[in-house]
Amino acid sequence: MNSIHRALVALLFAVAFTSSVSAQGDQPVDDWEPASTNQPGSEFPKVNSEGRVMFRIKAPLAKTVSCSFRGSNEFKKDEEGVWTGFTRPLDEGFHYYTISIDGAEVPDPGSKYFFGAMRWGSGVEVPAHDRDFYAVKQTPHGQLREVLFYSESTKTTRRAFVYTPPGYEQSTEKRYPVLYLQHGWGENEYGWGVQGHANLIMDNLMAEGKARPFIIVMTYGMTNEVRFGGLSSFSIEPFETVLVDELIPFIDANFRTLTDQPNRAMAGLSMGGMETRLITLRNLDTFSHIGLFSGGSISMEDVQNTEEFKEKVKLVFVSYGSREIDGGRTRRGGDPKAHVEALKQAGVNSVFYVSPDTAHEWLTWRRSLREFAPLLFVNQTGASE
Amino acid sequence: MNSIHRALVALLFAVAFTSSVSAQGDQPVDDWEPASTNQPGSEFPKVNSEGRVMFRIKAPLAKTVSCSFRGSNEFKKDEEGVWTGFTRPLDEGFHYYTISIDGAEVPDPGSKYFFGAMRWGSGVEVPAHDRDFYAVKQTPHGQLREVLFYSESTKTTRRAFVYTPPGYEQSTEKRYPVLYLQHGWGENEYGWGVQGHANLIMDNLMAEGKARPFIIVMTYGMTNEVRFGGLSSFSIEPFETVLVDELIPFIDANFRTLTDQPNRAMAGLSMGGMETRLITLRNLDTFSHIGLFSGGSISMEDVQNTEEFKEKVKLVFVSYGSREIDGGRTRRGGDPKAHVEALKQAGVNSVFYVSPDTAHEWLTWRRSLREFAPLLFVNQTGASE
């Protein structure tokens, strides 16, 4: 898995150093509003129309306070010991961060906490102009269910979140297709249901008649030890076993699923995309639809090396944020767009999607799910209705 | 509602100043283990067999670091800028806390985060000798479902968590009784399912045949503005409307519930107990079983002032932590034990439970649920099976 390791490390660095120069000295637009990701009642952090984030931390005895967004201005302390600072304009969408107080890296007490970068910590939402597609609306809502399942291969009881669509509880005879949906490196099974808003995206798509109802299953994809550096020993087999041999049978036994290959999809973001590619190519009797969000692509070599690929695969969906790619090419030199074109030429139903003005971040992945979901299970007999 | 306000403030102060003297200078037992409430991979905080908690925070430039547990020793900094300190022996169970770094009150980056004291922040579990009753076991597990419902009275979409018992998904004809279960002041709808382990307590009780299967519904009980000091304007009516007129019909429409009065219970801890008392006494056509955990009791005056109390109420359960009461009396002068005795004398099915060696804290309430659940819905026809 060394190539995966290298690619991921490269990705992480690309993300870390992608953005523009310091805004030091700029005068920010004075239309600050509390972030939607704040703790109940917290005024700070605030966000303005430029996408800057302003932090306020009371630390009367501190010598230095800062945040983890590069290019932020220097935090200043007032006479009451309250430190204030703000960032450069950030991309629309969701960003993880930390606050540093005299060298201690801590969560911001003003924000809610999210799991990313291997820890529960602060996150902030810069409102996206198209945020309506994951807004809470007065439409029927699905349920997001926390379930526990026993995994014999790891000898652990593991958690999964299962989204059941609106109507699932009422139509007690109906069976549904299933999408297995994976988080990225350093994230966990909470990601898609919390900062990803997968449930709201699906609620809204279904309310508008844009997607067929299906179940989504999200579980933890890093079966190796949870340690910094654990990626260097990453291998797909332990997670493949948990997902294919343990979780899928559990889901099929405990939910009203359609259990045949045409009605099962897998997708993932970043590392979850790489997992999806590896697992689906090895299990095409299990999965028919494949989604890779900022997580590689499927080449003609993959097609040629995989028995009955063209017969079994109903969809290959590949997406990236526009800031991750240059033309169709990723910064590391791969060319997912060309791969998708080649698949199309070969008669494979393939789609390439680019999220405008976003990088390797959650707004890219929320939009990817919005684009991917309507393409799923559209020609299956027996599926829903 | 001024009397509720005064009582709650008194309770909070009683909790804050209940415990014993400083352990400054004591030599702790050197059998420290990472707390079960830690972030994945975090070594600190650690807990020892005395119930002390040891913190470690890297803050090289800080002048002073401390924790919010009174009676903790002074934190010391090593040559690498890492601060270490430990608490006095704490009660078994769960405790909220904060870390102070040069006057900034922040979450501990080593812990997971829990909602209490009006914010998402750090918590630590001191292993209880009887923790087996909420351990994760290889038994059938229920599901903990996040649901969204629209509330006309508040014009908001609100969250509830719904625990469905093992077997609910398989027995698609069966209908279940429902317990509405409330958190305390400064907490929210996550409390019972996260730090309360209500799902695991129920899974284990049912696996041992000690409780009948029922649904539990948990929603946010502070309908007033979420602000510090908001309690002074607290009134029961807004929440009563959300619970009785909006949530109950939603649950009955979306889950396979038994919808008659004998199959509906309400319980709550602390402020949630006071809400339970107020709401059930005004709605005895809706609720038949009442549970008050560290949250007051029902007097003979209540019985006399409430029409058909004796005919309609099937159970009054009252509990406290032993450190909250003196004999049967609470520190504020009430006597819940005497109230329960009077109810028994009057022919009302009543139970008084005291949790050994705990105060106004989650171990008291976990144990209260363990004692309360087996008493619910035991004589109802039509309930389950």
Image: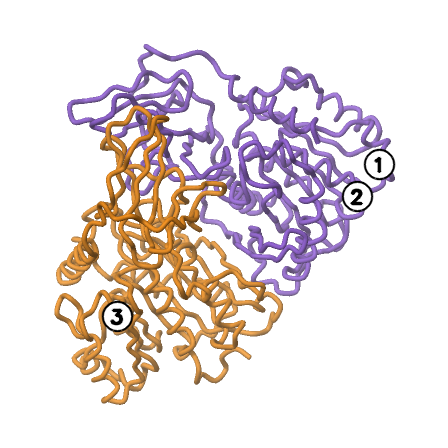
Chain colours: A orange, B purple
Alpha carbon of mark 3 to alpha carbon of mark 1: how far? 65 Å
Say which mark, if any, is on residue A277: 3
Judging by the rendered image, the residue that carries numbered circle 1 is B306
Judging by the rendered image, the residue that carries numbered circle 2 is B284
Camera-nearest residue between B96 and B356? B96
Asked if residue A143 lies left or right of residue A265, the reply is right
Camera-nearest residue between B330 and A16? A16
Q: Position of residue B206 (x, y in %)?
A: 58, 47
**Residue type highlighted by circle 1:** Thr
**Residue type highlighted by circle 3:** Arg
Residue for point 66% across, 15% down: B327
- Residues at marks 1 and 2 touching, judged by CB atoms closer than 8 Å: yes
Q: How many marks?
A: 3
Asked if residue A74 lies left or right of residue B149, the reply is left
Camera-nearest residue between A208 and A185? A208
Q: Mark 3: give few (<14), some (14-19) or many (20+) Cα within 10 Å.
A: many
Task: Classify mark 3: helix, strand or loop.
Answer: helix
Residue A313 versus residue B182 in the image, above or below: below
- Residues at marks 3 and 1 touching, judged by CB atoms closer than 8 Å: no
Q: Can you tell which of label 3 and label 1 is closer to the viewer?
A: 1
Residue for point 75% across, 26% down: B340
Q: Position of residue A285 (x, y in %)?
A: 33, 77
Alpha carbon of mark 3 to alpha carbon of mark 2: how far? 57 Å
Asked if one can make out residue A251 in the rendered structure from this viewpoint, the answer is no
Asked if residue B364 lies left or right of residue B267, the reply is left
- Residues at marks 3 and 2 touching, judged by CB atoms closer than 8 Å: no
Residue for point 30% across, 25% down: B102
Residue for point 47% across, 54% down: A146
Q: Position of residue B148 (x, y in %)?
A: 56, 57
